């Protein structure tokens, strides 16, 4: 669809239809769901990978490390493209690329090849993570984005749970390569549905503010955008924790004495129920709180990070009988801020540089977050214990708390209109 001239105001633009917006939300959420299935299959099979290739915990953590290296390095270019080209064809290309890489996993029979495979996958997933939220922001106005992105990011806990389950159930029976074949099929189907049914709106069609050329200059001034920076850095610290926990929790539970045959099912159930519940409750709380407090997106995210810490302490260092209940409460708490924090970042920037801003955000959260955390945790684990390594995630949650409370103080009164 041809975009309207950038100097047109919100009232002069043709708003996306309700049906078109709902179709986009359903298809992009489904694709995000498959995206997180792909990402969390590896933790579900990594003990098999370790046994086959005879590698250390640090080397095992490097698989995720190289995934996020390419993920964050691809982000600046894909963000630049997303602010200049239609997002729909770019999303379809990304989905096809991810499915193709999963199919090619069956040819991997050396550990270095597995590193390369996961690195290539990072390019496709980074692109999808930029284009989909930016496109959804053009379908929905500022006041609805917390609710919409909360729905979109329910894919994280549900997709992660299914990824763990596929890794355990399919990988346990047919080997660790087969789960990647299984995850390739739905990606291809959803890409076809997006190509046929999704209609891309004009860039900035649902923004209340004008999107004139003066906003182009803001692409180089994101470093002076305090609400954006605090939200991004707070998310980076949260991502450090989530990345480390998701990568190492299957191994942590197995080494604590839980059966390999039930770890995937247990983690899948906890991640789906606690993560989905936390995401839904956090989005609901923020939406209600926004009626009386313009800082609600930041405050819900800050409290989410803070209350995660004591539950993490019990899970990592407490008695075995308390590990699973504490893990469930920690997962619920950490996911409370998912929708609000992503909405805060999207609302902090204008439509004309939104893809670039999301790309910079992805670069930072992965450079500071889940790119180093699995490897750092593995290195500490090799020298001490895995519990001590996982303790690094609690420190990062405290840093996230401080950043997000500070970020709330920088918001202007008209932050959400």
Image (tube, rainbow, N blue to C red):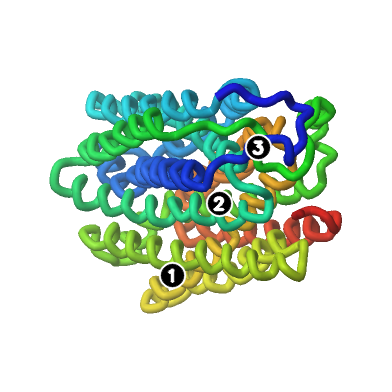
Indicate which disc residue 205 carries: 3
Q: Relative to residue 7, is residue 159 depicted above or below? A: below
**In the displayed structure, does residue 213 sit left or right of residue 114?**
right
Marks 2 & 3, CB-CB < 8 Å contact: no
User: Marks 1/2: CA distance?
Assistant: 23 Å
* Quadrant location, the N terminus: top right
Residue 177 shows in this picture: yes
The residue identified by callout 1 is 328
Task: Please provide percent x and percent y for residue 221.
Answer: 82, 32
Residue sitting at 64 percent across and 31 percent down? 203
- Judge depth for marks 1 and 2 and give the one in front: 2
Q: Earlier in the sequence, mark 1 or mark 2?
A: 2
Q: Cα distance, mark 3 to mark 1?
A: 40 Å
Q: Earlier in the sequence, mark 2 or mark 3?
A: 2
Image position of 349 with respect to 75: above or below:
below
Q: Provide the secondary structure element on which disc 3 rests.
A: loop
Mark 2: which secondary structure?
helix
Percent across and percent down for residue 97 are 38, 25
- Which quadrant does the C terminus fall into? bottom right
Residue nearest the observer in this picture, 375 or 29: 29
Residue 384 in the image, given as x and y percentages of width and height:
49, 56
Q: Estimate the spatial distance between the alpha carbons at disc 2 and disc 3, rounded to whole Å.
A: 17 Å
Q: Which residue is mark 2?
A: 149
Q: Badge 1: how crowded within 10 Å, few (<14), some, or many (20+)?
A: many
């Amino acid at each position: 669809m041809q975009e309207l001239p950038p100097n047109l105001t919100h009232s002069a633009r043709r708003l996306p239809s309700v049906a078109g917006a709902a179709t986009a939300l359903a298809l992009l959420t489904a694709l995000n769901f498959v995206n997180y299935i792909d990402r969390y299959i590896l933790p579900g099979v990594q003990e098999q990978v370790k046994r086959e290739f005879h590698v250390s915990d640090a080397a095992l953590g490097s698989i995720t490390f190289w995934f996020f290296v390419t993920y964050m390095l691809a982000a600046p270019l894909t963000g630049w493209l997303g602010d200049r080209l239609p997002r729909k064809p770019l999303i379809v290309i990304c989905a096809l690329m991810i499915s193709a890489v999963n199919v090619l996993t069956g040819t991997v029979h050396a550990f270095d090849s597995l590193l390369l495979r996961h690195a290539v996958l990072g390019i496709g997933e980074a692109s999808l993570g930029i284009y989909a939220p930016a496109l959804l922001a053009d379908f929905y106005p500022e006041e609805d984005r917390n609710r919409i992105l909360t729905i979109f990011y329910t894919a994280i806990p549900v997709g992660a749970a299914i990824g763990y389950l596929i890794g355990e159930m399919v990988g346990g029976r047919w080997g660790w390569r087969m789960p990647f074949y299984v995850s390739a099929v739905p990606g291809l189907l959803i890409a076809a549905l997006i190509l046929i049914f999704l209609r891309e709106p004009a860039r900035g069609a649902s923004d209340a503010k004008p999107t004139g050329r003066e906003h182009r200059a803001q692409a180089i001034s994101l470093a002076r955008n305090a609400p954006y920076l605090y939200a991004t850095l707070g998310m980076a610290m949260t991502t450090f924790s989530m990345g480390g926990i998701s990568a190492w929790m299957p191994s942590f539970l197995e080494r604590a004495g839980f059966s390999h045959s039930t770890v995937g099912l247990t983690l899948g159930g906890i991640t789906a129920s606690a993560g989905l519940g936390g995401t839904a409750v956090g989005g609901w709380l923020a939406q209600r709180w926004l009626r009386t407090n313009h800082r609600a997106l930041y405050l819900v995210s800050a409290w989410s990070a803070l209350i995660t810490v004591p539950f993490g302490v019990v899970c990592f260092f407490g008695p075995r009988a308390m590990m699973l209940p504490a893990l469930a409460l920690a997962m619920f708490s950490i996911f409370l801020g998912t929708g609000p924090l992503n909405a805060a970042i999207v609302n902090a920037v204008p439509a004309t540089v939104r893809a670039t801003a999301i790309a910079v955000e992805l670069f930072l959260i992965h450079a500071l977050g889940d790119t180093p955390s699995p490897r750092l945790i593995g290195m500490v684990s090799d020298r001490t214990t895995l519990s001590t390594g996982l303790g690094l995630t609690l420190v990062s949650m405290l840093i996230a708390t401080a950043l997000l409370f500070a970020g709330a103080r920088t918001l202007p009164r008209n932050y959400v209109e």
